[in-house]
Image (tube, rainbow, N blue to C red):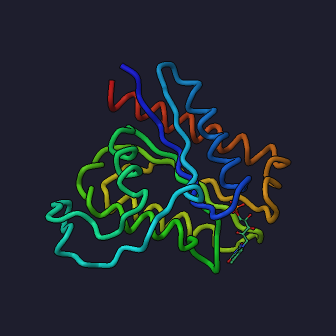
Amino acid sequence: MSVKILGVVGSPRKRSNSEVLVKEALEGSKLIPDTETELVLLCDKKIGFCKGCYEICQHGKVKKPCPNQDDMEELLTKLLEADGYIFGSPTYMGGVPGLMRAFMDRTVPIYYKLRGRVAGIIAVGDAQFGSQELVAQSIRTFCMSHQIISQEWPVCAVAAWPGEISKDKRVLQMAKEMGQNVAKLTAKLYQ
Ligand SMILES: Cc1cc2nc3c(=O)[nH]c(=O)nc-3n(C[C@H](O)[C@H](O)[C@H](O)COP(=O)(O)O)c2cc1C
C-alpha cells in the first residue's frame, strides 16, 4: 500500500522560499518506497476567510454548505486523501500570513477527520530570530487541533528574496531529511 504526502505552501508569492523547502522535503519523502507526493500552492487558490457562522460546520458536523464559494472544498478533499503533510509558510509580522491563516481556519469542516496523520513544518523569515518559531508553533497548534502528529523539530530558515533559500544547502538537507522522516513514520502508521 502506498502513502501520500501532501505539501502545502502558504506563501502568497510565486517562487517562494517556502515552496523551495516544501519541494525539497517532498523529494525526501519520495526516498521512502511507495510514497506518492503532491504539491499545493495556496497562492494559486481562492480562499475566503472563515465567517465564523459556527452553525454551518461545528466540530466537523457540516450542517449547511459553507457560504464561501471558493477552492477550499477541493483543498479539504486533498487533505482527507493524504496520509501525511509538509506545511511550509513564510513569517509575516511575526506570524503566518493571512493566506495561511485563512487556509487553516477553513479546515474546520473536517475537524476530527485528520486524526493520526503526520506533519512536518517549515517556517521562513528574512531575519534570524524573525519569529519563524511562532509560525512553526502556530502550524503545530493547528496540527494539534486536528490531532495530526508533528513529531519532528520544525525547519526554520532565513531568506528574504524569492528562491534565495536555494543557496542554503544545509537547510535544504534539513528539509529533505524531515520529509523523509515524515514519510517513514506515515508508512509505519499506515502500512
Ligand atoms: C508583510 C511582510 C512581513 C514580514 N514580516 C517578517 C517577520 O516578522 N519576520 C521575518 O523574519 N521576516 C518577515 N518578512 C520577510 C519574509 O518572511 C521573507 O521574505 C521570506 O523569505 C518569505 O518567504 P516566502 O518566500 O516563502 O514567501 C516579512 C515579509 C513581508 C512581505
- In percent of width and height, residue 67 lies at 29, 70
Say whether residue 123 is left or right of residue 62. Answer: right
Q: Residue at x 82, y 49 (%)?
A: 168
- Where residue 124 sits, quadrant-wise, is bottom right
Left or right of 70? Residue 37 is right
Q: Position of residue 68 (x, y in %)?
A: 35, 68
Q: Can you say whether 141 is above or below 20 in the image?
A: below
Work out whether 169 lies above or below 71: above
Seen in the picture, residue 34 relative to 157 is either above or below; the reply is above
Q: Nearer the viewer, residue 178 or 105?
A: 105
Q: Percent from the top left, x then y, of residue 58?
A: 18, 68
Q: Is residue 2 left or right of residue 91?
A: left
Instruction: Give the number of callouts.
Output: 0
Q: Taking 12 as reference, is 73 left or right?
A: left
Image location (x, y in percent) of residue 170:
78, 45
Work out which quarter of the rendered image holds the N terminus and state it.
Answer: top left
Task: Please report the residue visible at 38 percent of the width from the left and 37 percent of the height from the top.
Answer: 83
| The quadrant where residue 61 appears | bottom left
Residue displayed at 59% across by 24% down:
31
Of the four image quadrants, the one with ligand 1 is bottom right
Furthest-right residue in this view: 167
Quarter in which the C terminus is drawn? top left
Q: Which residue is at the front of the view, 106 or 116?
A: 106
